[in-house]
Image (tube, rainbow, N blue to C red):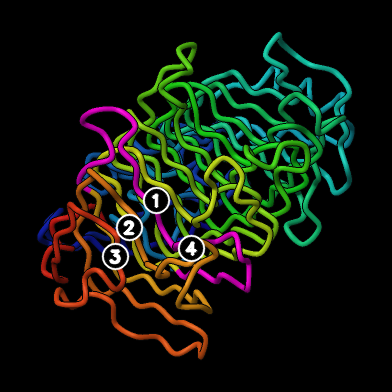
Amino acid sequence: MKKRITALITSAIFGSLSVMNVSAVTSEVKGDINNDGVFNVADMVTLQKWILNDVDKLQNWKAADLCTDNILDAFDMSMMRKHLLVPKTNIVRVTTSDELMSALAAAKAGDEIVVAPGEYICTTSTNTKGYQYHGAADGTEDSPIILRSEDPESPAILSGSTIQKQYALAITGDWWVLENIKVTGSSIGLVLDNSNNTKIINCEVYGTGQEAIHIRDGSSNCLVENTYIHDTGLKTAAYGEGIYIGSSYKAEEYEHACDNNRIRNCKIGPNVTAEHVDVKEYTTGTIIENCTFDGKGISGENYADSFVDLKGNDCILRYCTGYRNGEIRVNRAFEMNKLVDGWGQNAYIYGNKVYMDTSLNSEGKKMVILNSWNCTETVWDNYMAYEDGVLFYTDDEKDKWNYYNCNGLTYGDSSIEKELPQ
């Protein structure tokens, strides 16, 4: 028996209401309005013509009712367009280390590599740099390459074979998403080399010989979000950073400009032996926001005695919370340094709270929220606590030298924030 449907079209778009005859439903393919067994652009064209009264009868009206309201209208057309234009994802499921290595090596834009629960120990290097698990292909903005755990409650563990050398996971392509995975068991846990627009989300990186995450060699516009980093520097404490952005000016083999990277909602520490975030010279536009730092275990080696060290330009450090947790090697909350002329400039540091649990550091000097010399920074709405754990306001200019050891400091206010990246 033939069904009838009222085509409800808003007069602002398609004119008056229309009532059309439609045929019985036969195809089970969603969207297949012309009943040819496939859903493609031809179906969208058919629906558009019917809406515009250029077609009198539909072969299969129900297949096009994507809103499931027994009405064909512009909303169904919109959903058709969305389904057809959004690139399809190719699911690749892996359950062994060999399968994971093969999936990474063969990855292409639109692939979603889904890793079953378990530990995946890689015992070989895939290139001369010591990459173990390695993704080199490029995704795209519309079709990123996704690497994720099948079960977020039981994340897959990607492990190197030794903390003495190598990188457990290296991404050298653009537009990757790494989600709900654990990385451990190598010198550096996770490195992005010349990888742009890559996201590290809900991951955990720990048990590394040196740093946990290194965003390096021209990697820009990357995001590290909701990631837990702890127990680094097990081999070399001086290089046990939580997140390391860029490279030292002495490291000439790497592209230094790693720009516009963002660290957001991360928990870093305990037992991160160097700075929790170290932003190197020649980098621009790093944003560190809404992170929590646990200072227990900072080593003090190689001048690592603060939660964050900013050496790049135009950095933003905002709405973070730091806990010294009795670690005597933490001598100030934040640090800025000018290692190269023109760098270590124009930082914005605001809305942070640091619990330093002492008014004097291990050097017998005042515990300050920021130590910075020959750099420039603007601060406002920062708070600090000493022995009693009670936060107090640090940004009254008359108290500058009590809470800041800086010769290029400017005081701002919240009106500036609207001019900064959100």
Majority secondary structure in the magenta region: loop
Tag of residue 404: 3
> Which residue is labeled 1 in the image?
79
Please report the residue visible at 57 percent of the width from the left and 19 percent of the height from the top: 137
The residue tagged 2 is: 75
User: Which is more N-terminal, label 2 or label 3?
Assistant: 2
Separation of marks 4 and 3 at Cα, in angstroms: 21 Å
- The image quadrant that residue 100 belongs to is top right
Q: Badge 2: few (under 14), some or many (20 or more) residues near its Cα, within 10 Å?
A: some
The amino acid beneath tag 1 is Met
Residue tagged 4: 291
Marks 1 and 4 sit apart, C-alpha to C-alpha, by 38 Å
Q: Which residues are magenta?
A: 321-346
Q: Quadrant of the C terminus?
A: bottom left
Q: Per the image, is 345 magenta?
A: yes
Q: Secondary structure at mark 3?
A: strand
Q: Earlier in the sequence, mark 4 or mark 2?
A: 2
Closer to the camera in the image, 155 or 389: 389
Q: Do tag 1 and tag 2 residues touch (Cβ < 8 Å)?
A: yes
Position of residue 303 in the picture relative to residue 180 (left or right): left
387 to the left or right of 119: left
- How far from the left and from the top, in percent, is residue 71? 38, 64
What secondary structure is found at the residue carrying circle 4? Answer: loop
